[in-house]
Image (cartoon, coloured by chain):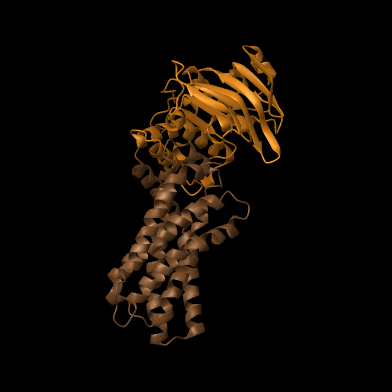
Chain colours: A orange, B brown
Amino acid sequence: MSTLAAPDAPHAGPPAAAVIPPSILLRQVSKRYGAVTALRGVTLKFAPGEFVLLLGPNGSGKSTLLRVAALLARPDTGQVDFADAGGVVLRDPREVKRSIGFVGHNSLLYDDLTAEENLLFFARLYGLEHAAARVADSIGATGLWKRRGDLVRTFSRGMRQRVSITRALLHRPGVLLLDEPAAALDREAVGWLAQALRALHDSGCTVLMSTHGRSDLTALATRAVRLETGEVKSDVGGPAAEAEA
Amino acid sequence: MSLLRAAAWVLLKEMRTEWRTRELLTTTVVFVLMVVVLFSFTFDPTREESRRFSPGLLWLSFLFAGSLMLNPSFTREQANDTWQALRLAPVEPFAVLLGKIGANLLFLTLAEWLLLPVFGVLYDVSLLRVLGSLAGVLLLGTLGLCVVGTVFAAISAQARMRELLLPVLLLPALTPVLIAGVEATAGLLEREPRLDWTWVKILAGFDVVFLAASYLTSEYLAEE
C-alpha cells in the first residue's frame, strides 16, 4: 500500500485493525424485498481474522447478506449477533458499528466536499482522536495526497473507490465488509486494493467480500461461501477457497 | 461522542455543502420573492387590508419555502448512498436528524430575513418597531416547520412519489403552527402592536412536543 503513496505524503502506513475483531453469527436469517426473497434461512458464523469470499450470481443475496451484517438492513426473521473474544454478545449497536467498516456499490462520499473534508467529516462522526492527523495519514496511503483538496465529484471511479475504502478504514474496524469492491477498477487500483486488504488481513481484521470472479483480491481468501437464490450452496475453507471463485 | 457534538458535525457538513452549491438558498429565496411579489400585484392592498391578510401571506410564503427546501435535505443523501454512511456511524440516529433540523432552521431563517424587507415595502407594513417580537415568533414557527418537515422529509425520501408525499404529509401536520404563527404575527402588525402570548405558547408547545416525538422516532426513521 505504501509503495503507491505519493512522495509528498506525510505518512503512508497501512491501516491496522485497532480493535479485536468480533465474531459474527447469522442465525436463520431471512430477508424479503417485496415479493423477492433475498435471503432464506441463512446460518453462518464468521470467526475473527477470516477472509471470506461471498460468491454467487447476481441476485443470489450477497449484497443483502453484507447489508444485514453491517446492520444496514434488519432481517425479517432470524438474528445477527456480534460477539467479543470471550463469546459475549455485543448489545450496544454503537459498539458494533464502531467495529464495522463498509464499502458498498456506491462511494458513500459527498460529491460537493473534497476528499479531505469527506474523510474529516466521517472521522469526527466516529469520534476519532487527532482526526486531522489520521486523515492526513490515510490520504497519504491512498496515493491521492495531491488531490486531497479537490471535490470528490472530479474524481474517477477508481479514485473515488480509494477514498471510499479509506473512509471505511479510518476508524480501524475489526470487520471490513466489501460489496464487489473491484467493480470498475483498473489493474493498478485493484493492485492497490489487494495490498490494502492484505495488510488489513495480516493485522487480524475480518474481511467479508462479495465478488463475481477470480482476481488479485481472491488470492487472499481463507474461506468461500457460495450463495444461490438466497441460500448457502457451499461453504469451503482453506486452499480450496480461491478455487471456488 | 455526545449527541450535540455529532449533530454539530452534521450541521457543519450541511452548511459547507450549501455554501459550495448554493442550491437550496438560491432557489428558495427566488421562489418566495416571486410569490410575495405576485401576491402584492394580485391584491394591490391598502395599508388596512395589508394588516388583515399579510400575516397569512407571509406564513404561506414560509410554508412554500419550507416545502421546497426540506425535501432535498434527505434526497441528496441518496446520490452516493451517503445516507448509509450516516447510518453506519456510531452516533445516535437523533444526532443526524438534529443536525439536519438545525441546518434547515438556519437556511429557512436566512431566507425569511431576506424576504422580510421586501415584504415590508410591498405590503406597506412597518416591521421595524416589532422586529424583536417578530423575530421570536418567526423563530418558534420556523422551528416547528423545520422539525416536522425534516422528519417527514426523512420518511418521504424513501418513498416512490417523494416530491408529492412531503407537501401532502406536511400541510395537515403544520396547521397548528400556521394558525398560531399567523395569529401571533397579526397581533404584531396591528395599529397598536401587541404580542399575544397564547399563540406564542402554542408555538413553543408544538416545538417541544414534536422535538420529543422526533427524538423518540428517530431510530425508526434511520431504518430502511
Tell me, yes or no, if residue B206 can be seen here. Answer: yes
Residue at 33% x, 67% y is B198
Position of residue B179 measured from the top left corner of the image (x, y, whole percent): 43, 69
Horizontal side of B204 relative to B75 (left or right) equals left
Q: Quadrant of the N terminus of chain B?
A: top left
Query: Is B166 positioned to the left or the right of B218 in the image?
Result: right
- The picture quadrant where one finds residue B164 is bottom right
Residue A133 percent across, percent down from the top left: 35, 34
Q: Nearer the viewer, residue B61 or A112?
A: B61
Q: Find residue B181 and report its image quarter.
A: bottom left
- Please identify the quadrant where the C terminus of chain B is shown: top right
The answer to whether B214 is drawn above or below residue A105 in the figure is: below
- Direction from residue B107 to residue A240 in the image, left or right: right
Residue B33 or residue B169, whichever sits in front: B169
Q: Residue at x 54, y 27 (%)?
A: A80
Residue drawn at (36%, 47%) of the image: B8
Residue at far bottom of view: B46
Residue drawn at (40%, 76%) of the image: B118
| Residue A114 visible to an observer of this rendering | no
What x and y, as percent, mark residue A126?
40, 35
* B88, A240: nearer the viewer: B88
Q: Residue furthest front?
A: B198
